[in-house]
Image (cartoon, helix red, strand yellow):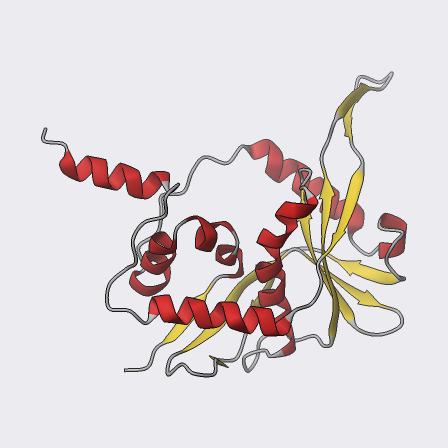
Amino acid sequence: MAQNWRLSPSDFGFLWNECKRCFYLKAARGFYRPFGAFPKIFTVIDRAMKEQFEGRDVSELVPELPRGKVMTGKKQVESAPIEVPGHQGKCYIYGNFDIVVGFEAGGYGVIDFKTTEIRDEKAALYSAQLHAYAHALENPAPGAMGLKPVTMLGLLCVEPSVAERAPDGVYSLKGRSKWIPVPRDDAGFMGLLGEVLDVLGKPEPPPPGDKCDWCAYREKARAVKF
């Protein structure tokens, strides 16, 4: 029977590249990795930065970009079913994105906000995630949020590096921002979806990733006799 797999944009980066077995178990079997501890400070910084961005002209924040209004907050997207050539099964995108920009000259930009510095060579890990958001916005499911055309993708990275104390005793964190553009490559994204459907279409999960600590722990736990 042909499936219609629900795929999360955030899983296209680290989970898919780190361990296709864990990706399969989540998407095909509903078996999720345990959620790790996430320090509250990152959530606080992320929220404060987005409050600064909301409604502002993106060219004030990123001089490389044309004028356009920033809209932040968790925006939910869901795509119509995606048919990938050569595959009987389908998939659809479902998730929340960080920032969208409506450019004055027309079109939209999808930006992922990062509270850390990311090296240019690591930006490719987030390319599929951004493409997934763009596809969902341009090809929404009935009743879902839609915006098109999406003309720009990128990462806005801000890593606090300096702490300052004002005379009134209020502390602030400061850091430089870095804009990393992500080229649009729809053909490459569809090729990735083909690889994903190849894996999800198998009756059994693939082998664990070489560097997957979760799979290594499960295997060791099975071998231990208490």
Rendering quarter of residue 96: bottom right
User: What quarter of the picture does the C terminus occupy?
Assistant: top left
Count up the numbered dots.
Answer: 0
The image quadrant of residue 3 is bottom left
Taking the spot 82% from the left edge, 56% from the top edge, the residue there is: 55
The location of residue 71, given as percent across then percent down, is: 75, 59
Name the residue rendered at 71%, 35% in the picture: 159
**Image quarter (top left, top right, bottom left or bottom right) of the N terminus:** bottom left
- The residue under the point 48% across, 73% down is 92
Q: Is residue 162 left or right of residue 208?
A: right
Q: Residue furthest left?
A: 225
The answer, for residue 175, to whether it is visible in the render is yes
Answer with left or right where residue 155 lies relative to residue 167. Answer: left
Comparing 51 with 164, the one in front is 164
Look at the image and tell me whether residue 78 can be seen. no
Q: Position of residue 149 (x, y in %)?
A: 73, 76
Above or below, 35 relative to 184: above
Q: Where does the image place residue 117, in percent across and percent down from the top left?
A: 69, 38
Q: Is residue 223 left or right of residue 41?
A: left
150 is higher (above) or lower (below) than 210: below
Front-most of 1 and 74?
1
Residue 224 higher or lower than 95, as above or below: above
Instruction: Relative to 185, say whether 118 is above or below.
Output: above
Q: Nearer the viewer, residue 96 or 14?
A: 14
At a point 62% along the width and 58% down the height, the residue shown is 127
Q: Position of residue 61 (x, y in %)?
A: 85, 49
Viewed as shown, does residue 4 lie left or right of 174?
left
